[in-house]
Image: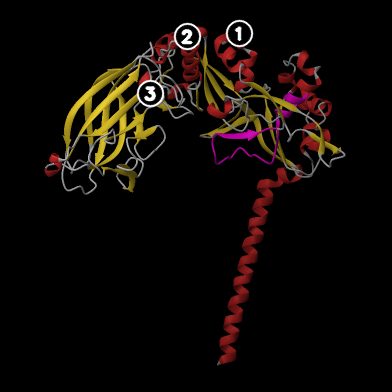
Amino acid sequence: MNNKHNFIINFGRICAVLVILVAFSCKDDAMDEHYGQEDKGLESSILETLSSDTNYSTFVELVKQAGFEELLSSSQAFTVWAPNNEALALVSSDVLNDPDALTELIGNHISRFSYGSTINESPLFVKMLNDKSIEFSNIDGQVTFGDVDLLEKDILTSNGILHKLSSVLSVKPNIWGFLNDNEAEFPTLMDYFSQYNETLFDEAKSVKTGTNSLGQTVYDSIFSSSNTQFKTIGDLSSEDDRFTFIGLTDDAYAGIYDTFKEYYQYPVEDSVKSNTDRTIFSNLTFPVLDLEDLNGSLIENTVGNSVLLDGTGTSVESLSNGNVFVVNTLNYDAKNVMYKPIRYEVENNKRREIGSLTDFSVVQKYQDVASGKFTNIVSLLANPENGNDYFEVAFSNVLSASYNINLKFSAIGAAQDTQLKFEFSYVDASGNTVVNNIDSMVISNLEEGIVPIGDTYDIPVYINEEIDNEYTVKLKIIIDVSEPELILYERKFGLDYVELTPVE
């Protein structure tokens, strides 16, 4: 019985194997039939494949002139987007006769690795041999590379993939290159950025030639130009990042400057200009956008401000690392750019003074609902006298504008209400200190919210972040509970933050 059973099992296994072999044989026949042409192509490199087509003889010759022949004959994987002779006949002789320009142009058609047209990520930005990134897109079967249609696609070779084009892919500058090439169109903008130009040693592109007597590496050095403003707004010269930049003409600059300068009033005119310019030119860089994205929505720029961009009358320059929107008007709303609430978290002891450290304390207390995850227990331990009854905070980066004052209180378990009074002070343009006394008010021990105090105050001078600035804006918070009043009130309360709120 066992022998019969084993025979049946083994016979079944043999049949299963035969079925699988037959299936694979059929599949191989089908594969050979489908890919037969490509299989023959795999015997030739990309350059050999191109050389067999007389319509691409000019490109093959230029590849050799540019020094890429050996590379494209190697076993590494490449993708080439090759323009035909007719397209290359339109290229300026100035480019073809300039070795550097020719290398840039041919490198603009070759990338490392294999990129077929059935790309999963669309658009895909392909890094070319000249370090430029070009968009490879497949939308509903419509395949383009750098907005150029493919004549033939996905020609397989022994060392990669070949696509054929009817147009040359011109070498586009990056945003920084475009602005420098067209600085006459943006004179004030480029004058501003030129202050921050710098020359940097490019170690990645420099060639090591040996070591000196101290054992330090010696390079055949390559230097590149950059700008320190890129640390704030993003590197406009980088081919690895993509941006939209607002190309601000002088007409657009003049309009937005006249609007913004009112917020930076200061006795020194140079200060007004430098602070206004800093705000304007720091708010021109965005993640990459299309013109149709400008549909009335607030868009966040690279420094975290939300602005409303209007595409009306805007022209677009498509570049290797994004685009430039050239505008003649710029209608930024100050409330989205710089005229914002100015908050002082009370647990921060910078710019904070306390009347008497022995009698008065501000202690952090962790609280999930607090703005900075900390609220503060403020308490007066002794009878208020000799100026020990207050703490004072000084604000920075207060614009020359109108503000209301809001205090965010928190319940910290005090048994009774407290009573506070306030002094809001600032130094005016003449150097005089203006003090506004705010009447005493009772704050509930259960208060868990924002309480407005005082009136609307017009700050006449821009207060920057410098601690030793002679112009100041300060709020003094005074515990106004005498000894007899301890029956009704406590000298302890919870306070999260103090905020100057812009007036609409």
Question: Image point 60% across, 90% down: which residue?
Answer: 3
Is residue 325 magenta-colored? no
10 Å crowding of disc 2: few (<14), some (14-19), many (20+): few
Three-letter code for the amino acid on which mark 1 is drawn? Ala
Q: Say left or right for 139 vs 379.
A: right
Is residue 115 magenta-colored? yes
Q: Is residue 54 above or below residue 383?
A: above
Q: Contact (CB < 8 A) between labels 1 and 2?
A: no
10 Å crowding of disc 3: few (<14), some (14-19), many (20+): some
Query: Considering only order in the chain, which callout, 2 or 1, is on the residue closer to the N terminus?
Result: 1
At numbered mark 3, what does the secondary structure look like: helix, strand or loop?
A: helix
Residue where numbered disc 3 is placed:
336
Q: Quadrant of the C terminus?
A: top left
Residue where numbered disc 2 is placed:
269
The colour scheme used to paint the residues is secondary structure
Three-letter code for the amino acid on which mark 3 is drawn? Asn
Query: Considering only order in the chain, which callout, 1 or 3, is on the residue closer to the N terminus?
Result: 1
At numbered mark 1, what does the secondary structure look like: helix, strand or loop?
A: helix
Q: Nearer the viewer, residue 432 or 290?
A: 432
Q: Nearer the viewer, residue 467 or 328?
A: 467
Question: Can you tell which mark lies on residue 184?
Answer: 1
Q: Is residue 309 above or below residue 490?
A: above
